[in-house]
Image (cartoon, grey):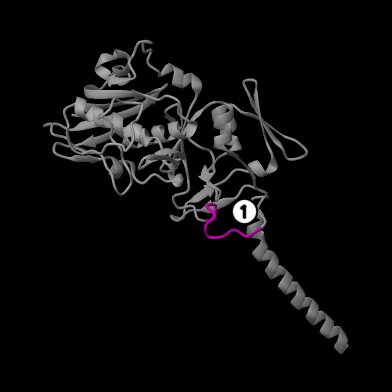
């Protein structure tokens, strides 16, 4: 009898321990990606969502997402399969080996199991404000989708912009083949027509030639940071202050930069074409330039003496709005042109 009571006591304790372990394990079973082998840590964006949720726009239209879009701990921007099917028209097939095949317009992209994220069920998480955030079962890397279907992808401050080839072509000015490599946009009416509703005070363009995808990405990203910036009368524009530090976390990539009399690789390479074009746009519109620095080596996208280099913490481009009205800076990349303009904002 005593032995029987002892056995029952041990069984009850073991059952209690088992239930306690099971209760602690359930959240991990339902919230951890299948690929994950370790318990989620504090740096995992799925468990630290403040500032990690992403906003998506496609062809300049903000998208309403059915599920949270987010950046994972590898820095990948991820979109739910449901939203990708609805917004991008992708067809998806998951084979027996868990390879995910995406198809559209005769193109096919196969993602191996370690190339996308798959959850055991639909998790519901709470952000720092206590709001419920729904996640889908399957998440796709946006970069892979953009590469396969030739979307232009821009990442900036938690926002992802996708531009389709057809939309980009429709928005591109039909410039004559005889257009010089750089100059005032006043000499190219097609460039002025990019902003038909704006009163252009002055503007400038330069041409992108022999540039890597990384360099072009950096130019587009820096233009995106500047575009729409307003300056009240007497206010000073700072390139570094507006664009901010160029980091991989903001989407900037490694490309050639000048270091003294050498060309080396650095994060943000190429943005000096943006600053140079802006410097000349400021001059063309009569702004008061108060800080500008030359490159240490010649550049190919502007004539000698009209360049403007920038470097975080050292060299900046600054100019003052010396007009009696507020101005707005417009910046874009169309085909192989970097185009910046100063317009009247009031």
**Image quarter in which the C terminus is found:** top left
Q: Nearer the viewer, residue 179 or 185?
A: 179
**Image quarter in which the N terminus is found:** bottom right
Q: Does residue 99 show up? A: yes
Name the spot of residue 281 as percent of width and height, x first.
Answer: 24, 27
Segment colored magenta? 38-47
In the drawing, does residue 172 fall left or right of residue 236?
Answer: right
Q: Residue furthest bottom?
A: 2
Q: What residue lies at 51% left-to-right and 50% top-to-bottom? A: 132
In the drawing, does residue 228 fall left or right of residue 40?
Answer: left
Secondary element at tag 1: helix
177 relative to 97, above or below: above
In the drawing, does residue 221 fall left or right of residue 186?
Answer: right
Q: Which residue is mark 1?
A: 31
Q: Residue furthest front?
A: 261
Q: Nearer the viewer, residue 71 or 143?
A: 143
Q: Does residue 86 show up? A: no
Q: What's the magenta bit mostly, secondary-structure-wise?
A: loop
Magenta-span inclusion, residue 43: yes
Q: Quadrant of residue 179?
A: top left
Q: How many marks?
A: 1
Q: What residue lies at 54% left-to-right and 43% top-to-bottom? A: 76
122 relative to 162, above or below: below
Q: Dot 1 surroundings within 10 Å: few (below 14), some, or many (20 or more)?
A: many
Q: Nearer the viewer, residue 228 or 236?
A: 236
227 relative to 252, above or below: above
Q: What residue lies at 26% left-to-right and 14% top-to-bottom? A: 187
Q: What residue lies at 86% left-to-right and 89% top-to-bottom? A: 2
Name the spot of residue 279 as percent of width and height, x first.
Answer: 25, 32
Name the spot of residue 148 as percent of width and height, x first.
Answer: 59, 28
Q: Nearer the viewer, residue 116 or 261?
A: 261
Name the spot of residue 156 as percent of width and height, x first.
Answer: 41, 40
């Amino acid at each position: 009898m005593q032995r029987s009571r002892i056995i029952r006591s041990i069984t009850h304790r073991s059952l209690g321990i088992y239930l306690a372990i099971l209760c602690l394990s359930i959240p991990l079973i339902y919230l951890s990606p299948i690929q994950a082998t370790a318990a989620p840590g504090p740096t995992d964006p799925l468990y630290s969502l403040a500032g990690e949720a992403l906003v998506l726009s496609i062809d300049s239209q903000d998208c309403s997402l059915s599920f949270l879009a987010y950046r994972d701990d590898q820095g990948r921007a991820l979109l739910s399969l449901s939203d990708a099917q609805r917004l991008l028209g992708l067809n998806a097939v998951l084979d027996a080996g868990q390879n995910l095949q995406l198809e559209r317009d005769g193109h096919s992209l196969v993602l191996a199991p370690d190339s996308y994220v798959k959850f055991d069920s639909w998790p519901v998480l709470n952000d720092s404000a206590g709001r419920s955030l729904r996640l889908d079962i399957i998440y796709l890397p946006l970069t892979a989708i953009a590469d396969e279907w030739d979307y232009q992808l821009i990442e900036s401050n938690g926002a992802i912009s996708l531009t389709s080839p057809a939309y980009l072509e429709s928005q591109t000015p039909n410039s004559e083949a005889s257009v010089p490599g750089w100059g005032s946009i006043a000499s190219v009416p097609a460039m002025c027509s990019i902003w038909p509703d704006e009163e252009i005070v002055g503007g400038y363009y330069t041409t992108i030639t022999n540039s890597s995808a990384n360099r072009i990405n950096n130019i587009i990203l820096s233009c995106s940071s500047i575009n729409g910036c307003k300056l009240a009368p007497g206010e000073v524009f700072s390139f570094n202050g507006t664009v901010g530090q160029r980091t991989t976390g903001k989407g900037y990539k490694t490309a050639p930069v000048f270091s003294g009399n050498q060309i080396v690789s650095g994060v943000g390479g190429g943005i000096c074409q943006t600053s140079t074009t802006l410097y000349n746009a400021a001059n063309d519109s009569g702004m008061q330039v108060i800080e500008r620095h030359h490159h240490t080596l010649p550049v190919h996208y502007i004539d000698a003496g009209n360049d403007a280099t920038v470097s975080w913490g050292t060299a900046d481009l600054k100019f003052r709005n010396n007009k009696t009205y507020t101005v707005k800076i417009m910046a874009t990349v169309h085909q192989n042109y970097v185009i910046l303009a100063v317009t009247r904002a009031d």
